Image: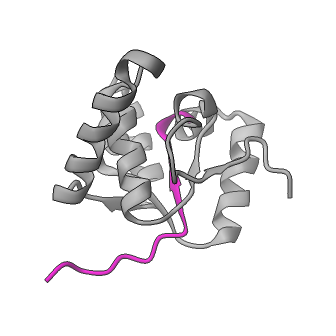
Amino acid sequence: MEQTINVRVCLDSDVLIEVQRGNEDALQQLVFAERLGPLAISVVVRMELTIGSRNKEMLARTHKLLRRFQVLPLNEEISVTADALVTQFHLSNGMRLADALIAATALAHDAPLLTRNQRDFRFIPGLKLLPYPPTA
């Protein structure tokens, strides 16, 4: 039996990369998202940030930041949805594998996605995107 996970917002890696860089807008985005409820990231986001760490110090800072979020694993539903997204949107919109998996994770958990790269996701039916910057 799968565990029910209460997620209010999924975060894309681009927001967290900017948080790590000290970008004030990204920090405000994170505060905004935290007010909405529990935050989560796809395991794909964790892997992207880990791979982007250039040294042990940066990797330690990355892991410290990521402890704030629930990490959502991939499952069959997410895999099937991501495959469908790539099949449908690769040629027309340039859908990439990591973005498809991140979007499919948000869809599977019925959670909005907070991302700076709205253009990479705005064409996906049923995916809720939080405005960047927030309007509220």
Secondary structure mostly taken by the magenta-highlighted segment of the chain: loop
Whether 12 is among the magenta residues is yes
For image coordinates 67% across by 69% down, the residue present is 36
Image quarter hosting the N terminus: bottom left
Asked if residue 16 shows in the view, the reply is yes
Image coords of residue 127 (percent x, y): 52, 51
Instruction: Say above or below: 81 vs 56.
Output: below
| Residue 86 point in image, percent of width and height | 31, 30
Q: Pinpoint residue 50: horizontal percent, then vertical percent.
A: 32, 35
Pick the residue in front: 91 or 57. Answer: 91
Up/down of 131 relative to 36, above or below? above
Q: Name which quarter of the figure residue 52 lies in.
A: top left
Residue 83 or residue 109, whichever sits in front: 83
Q: Quadrant of the C terminus?
A: bottom right
Span highlighted in magenta in the image: 1-14
Q: Residue at x 59, y 30 (%)?
A: 117
Image spot of residue 132 (x, y percent): 73, 41
